[in-house]
Amino acid sequence: MTTTGPDRTGPDGAGPDRAGPDPGRPDRPDGLRDEPGLRDEPGPRDARDPRDADFIALDGVEKSFDVRRRVGLLRRERRRVRAVDELTFRVARGEMVGYIGPNGAGKSTTVKMLTGILTPSGGRLRVAGIDPARERTRLAHRIGVVFGQRTTLWWDLPLRDSYRLVHRMYRVPDARFRENLDRCVELLDLADLLEVPVRQLSLGQRMRGDIAAALLHDPDVLYLDEPTIGLDVVSKAKVREFLRDLNAERGTTVLLTTHDLTDIEQLCSRVMVIDHGRLVYDGSLGGLHEAGAGERTLVVDLERELPPVEVPGTRVVRVEGPRQWLAFPASASAAPLVAAVAAAYPLVDLSVREPDIEAVIARMYAGRRSA
Ligand SMILES: Nc1ncnc2c1ncn2[C@@H]1O[C@H](COP(=O)(O)OP(=O)(O)OP(=O)(O)O)[C@@H](O)[C@H]1O
């Protein structure tokens, strides 16, 4: 997710914010201004509130940027980039939704509008009944944000001190803060890291530290932007498990932006796909499979190496020794094809392979581009 542009709240750069956040800087990515005494009372938290279905609500939201481009040596050209275009969706309270799309699709821009960092150019947007652009400080107490590529922690301070600052900035009641911190320390395995300056933490440790910091004030909504980027398998598993538990136990609403589709597969029952600023899919992961799946594959193990298998309705896409891969339309039944192969060839084994989600999404994007 790109984080460039005038709305940036820290130094530019693809990697982590090396300088670390400046406690005196005006804005944090989660929209909270670093000033004492800003705590507003959070809104009602009645779980039976009928507005729960519209906890995050966007209606025809648009965001355009005016960009200047150099044309030749002296001339500059102004161009309007529509980053988000007529975006309409709902996220119910307690849902965990994946928000995916190719580079430049408009994911970051959406999240920035949801936090109040950016003001929409048009349309209507509400989070927990709050207009983020108008009441950014009030909203800050209801949301947590984790940017995988940048830290919101104080670079030179030990983790514990960063958490103390969060405690004071959000004015979290002491008992609540201790309870939340203890829980995060235990579940995110932070006990040995609390006295370590953030700059000395590994990426995985820092990420866990960031997730804890985003949750110490009990937000109702958590925006996660690439929370597992660059992490090893063990750290990814730990982060995912924590998020699953958080959602199940606390009912925290989660909007997850990621390029790692395993995050989505393991965490989200619903996924929204955005492309060129527009919502192009909103539904289950299974449905996404069907929408984007062009072909399935029969993997055929023959008794010996043979010329490519010829069965109507299939085409051989790969041959490795006695193993052959036969593609066939995803909508077709595999049974008659399996029977046809078994009748005509010396078969040892056979399996049907569904396209993996990466392939499905790549096909979906490619299809839209060529349409
Ligand atoms: N501050 C800005 N000024 C000008 N153009 C911008 C600004 N922020 C985003 N854009 C443009 O808006 C479009 C959407 O960008 P955005 O960062 O929202 O995409 P993204 O889906 O998050 O991409 P990625 O997966 O690469 O991070 C892009 O064309 C981008 O260049």
Image (spheres, rainbow, N blue to C red):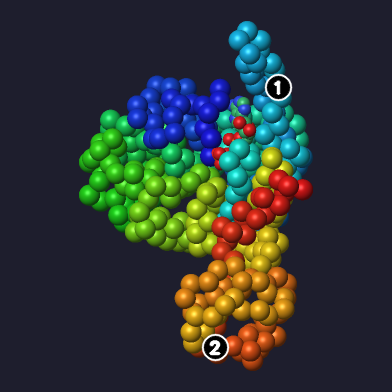
**Residue type at tag 1:** Arg
- Quadrant for ligand 1 reads top right
Q: Nearer the viewer, residue 128 or 362?
A: 362
Q: Nearer the viewer, mark 1 or mark 2?
A: 2
Question: Residue 164's x, y, as percent?
Answer: 33, 37
CB within 8 Å, label 1 to label 2? no
Residue on which disc 2 sits: 347
**Residue type at tag 2:** Leu
Residue located 60% across and 49% down the image: 100
Question: Residue 298's x, y, as percent?
Answer: 59, 76
Q: Residue furthest front?
A: 307
Q: Quadrant of residue 159?
A: top left
> Mark 2: is the Cβ under 8 angstroms from ligand 1?
no
Residue located 63% across and 85% down the image: 341
Question: Residue 244's x, y, as percent?
Answer: 47, 60
Q: Nearer the viewer, residue 308 or 269?
A: 308
Sort mark 1 into few (<14), some (14-19) or many (20+) by Cα contacts within 10 Å. Answer: few
Residue on which disc 1 sits: 79
Q: Secondary structure at mark 1?
A: strand
User: Would you place residue 368 above or below residue 306 in this image?
Assistant: above
Q: Quadrant of residue 241?
A: bottom left
